[in-house]
Image (tube, helix red, strand yellow):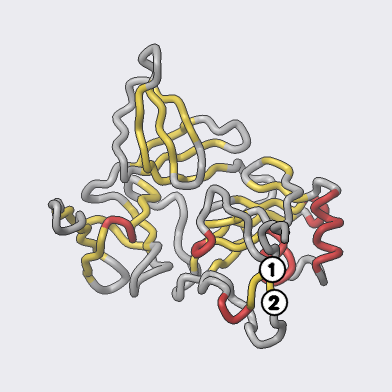
Amino acid sequence: MASRGESKTMKSISAPKARYFSRKKNVFTIKGRPGPHNRENSVPLSFLLRDVLESTKNLRETKAVLKQGKVRVNGEARKDYRLAVGLFDVVEIDSMKKKYRILFDGKGRIYAKEIEFRGKDFKVSKVTGKRTAKGGKTFITTGDGFTIPVEKEKISVGDSVKISLPGRKLEDIYEMKAGSSVFIVGGVHVGQSAKVHGIVEGNIQRQRLVSLEGEGNNFTTVEDNVFVVGKGKPEIEALGK
C-alpha cells in the first residue's frame, strides 16, 4: 500500500505545550510544518490566527484570508496555513491594521503582543552559526532561519542580532556579556526579562551558565535558556511591561 504522506493533523492532547488552548474541545488540531522554528516552541500560522488572536472563526475562513495575501510574517506575505510561527516573529494582518510580536508567557506558551502598526519593524534573532564561504565572505546563521553576510563586525555564537524587516539588514549586535538585557526562553523563569550579571564558562561535561539579575531575585540558568535582547535597555520586553 502506497504511503499517503505526512498527516496534517495531530491529537490535541499531544500538542506541544507552547499551544494555549482547550485540549478537550476537539480531538484533533493543526500540525505545524517543519521550518525556521521547531514544533515544540512554535504554532502553525492558522492556529495563531484562529485560536490565539481569534481573528478568524474557523480553518476555512483562515485559509481564505491567507490565500488573499493579507497576512505577513516578518515582512513577507505568507499563505501556508501550517507555517511555523515562533519567538519574536512579527505578524501583520493588513485587513485589520493590526501587528503583533510573538512572545512566551510565564508558562512557555505562545502569546501575541500587539505593537504599533505603522512602527519600524525589526526582528531579534539568536546567532547559532558562523562560517566563512569561498572567497572569504563571512556569514552568520540564526536560530530562526536567517543567513546574513557580515563584514568586520565582532559576532559570536550565542550573541543576538537586530535585523530590519522586510529588508533583513543587520542593524545592531547584542553580545552575551555582563550588563546585557535578556529574555528567558526556558526553565522556571521562562517569559521573564533579566540582566546578565556574569558568565560561568562550561566544559565538556557542563554547559555554559549565565548568572542573571531578575525581577527581585538573582538566579543562574544554562545559556540555551537565555536570549539576548539588548545592550542595556531591552529592545523587546516581557509581557506586562
Q: Residue at x 51, y 57 (%)?
A: 38
Secondary structure state at the residue bearing disc 1: strand
Q: Position of residue 87 (x, y in %)?
A: 51, 56
* For residue 180, side relative to residue 162 (left or right): left
Q: Residue at x 21, y 50 (%)?
A: 178
Left or right of 85, for residue 177:
left
Q: Amino acid at mark 1?
A: Thr
How crowded pointer 2 is (Cα within 10 Å; few <14, some 14-19, many 20+) is rated as: some
Taking 115 as reference, is 157 above or below it?
A: above
The disc placed on residue 9 is 1
Q: Is residue 64 left or right of residue 116?
A: right
- Judged from this view, the residue extending furthest toward the bottom is 24
Q: Which element type, helix, strand or loop, lies under badge 2? A: strand
Residue 43, placed above or below residue 13? above
Q: Determine the image quadrant of residue 206.
A: bottom left
Q: Position of residue 49 (x, y in %)?
A: 72, 63
How far across and down, in percent of the image, does residue 63 sit? 82, 58
- Circles 2 and 1, Cβ within 8 Å, touching? The answer is yes
- Identify the amino acid type marked 2: Phe
Specify few, some or many for label 1: CA neighbours under 10 Å numbering under 14, 14-19, or 20 or more: some
Quadrant position of the N terminus in the picture? bottom right
Residue occupying image coordinates x 29% and y 58%: 195
Per the image, the residue denoted by label 2 is 28
Which residue is located at x 55 percent, y 67 percent?
110
Relative image position of residue 141 (x, y in whole percent) = 43, 36
Earlier-in-chain disc, 2 versus 1: 1
